[in-house]
Amino acid sequence: MTLKTTPFDIVDFIQAPEDAVEYLKVVMEGGNSDEIRAALNNIVRARGVQKIATETGLTRAAIYKALGDHGNPTLSTLLALTKALGVRLSVAA
C-alpha cells in the first residue's frame, strides 16, 4: 500500500488574522529579508491576492512582482500591504 502525500503549503494554515500576525512576528524576529518577503507573500495568498490588490490600489502583477522570489518591495508597497493585512510594523530596543 502506497502512502499518499500532498505538498505542504503554510497558506492552508493561515486562517485567522491572529495566525498571520503570529507567523509574521516569528519570521521577523529571526528571519532575513527573503524570509520576511516570503512570509508576506504567504499571508497575502491566504487572504486573497485580488482582495489585497483592491484594498491597496496595487495591481495583482505588482504584488506578485514585489513579493515573488526575486522581489524587493518598496517601503510604500510594504506599508500598503501591511495596512491592508491589518498589521503594523514597529521598532523596539
Image (cartoon, rainbow, N blue to C red):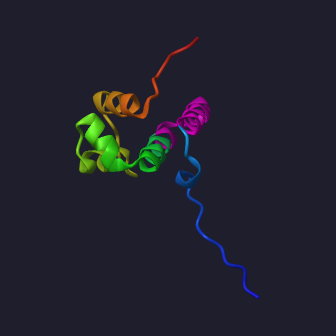
Depth check: give the residue in front, 2 or 68. Answer: 2
Q: Answer whether residue 28 is magenta in the image.
A: yes
Q: Quadrant of residue 25?
A: top right
Residue stretch rendered in magenta on the structure: 17-36
In this image, 85 relative to 12: left or right? left
Q: Residue at x 48, y 48 (%)?
A: 42
In this image, 14 relative to 41: left or right? right
Depth check: give the residue in front, 92 or 70. Answer: 92
Q: Residue furthest bottom?
A: 1
**Which quarter of the rendering shows the N terminus?**
bottom right
Q: Quadrant of residue 9?
A: bottom right
Q: Answer whether residue 40 is magenta in the image.
A: no
Q: Give coordinates of residue 31: x percent, y percent.
A: 57, 36
Q: Residue at x 47, y 49 (%)?
A: 46
**Which quarter of the rendering shows the C terminus?**
top right
Q: Residue furthest right?
A: 1
Q: Residue at x 55, y 46 (%)?
A: 14
Q: Give coordinates of residue 67: x percent, y percent.
A: 37, 45
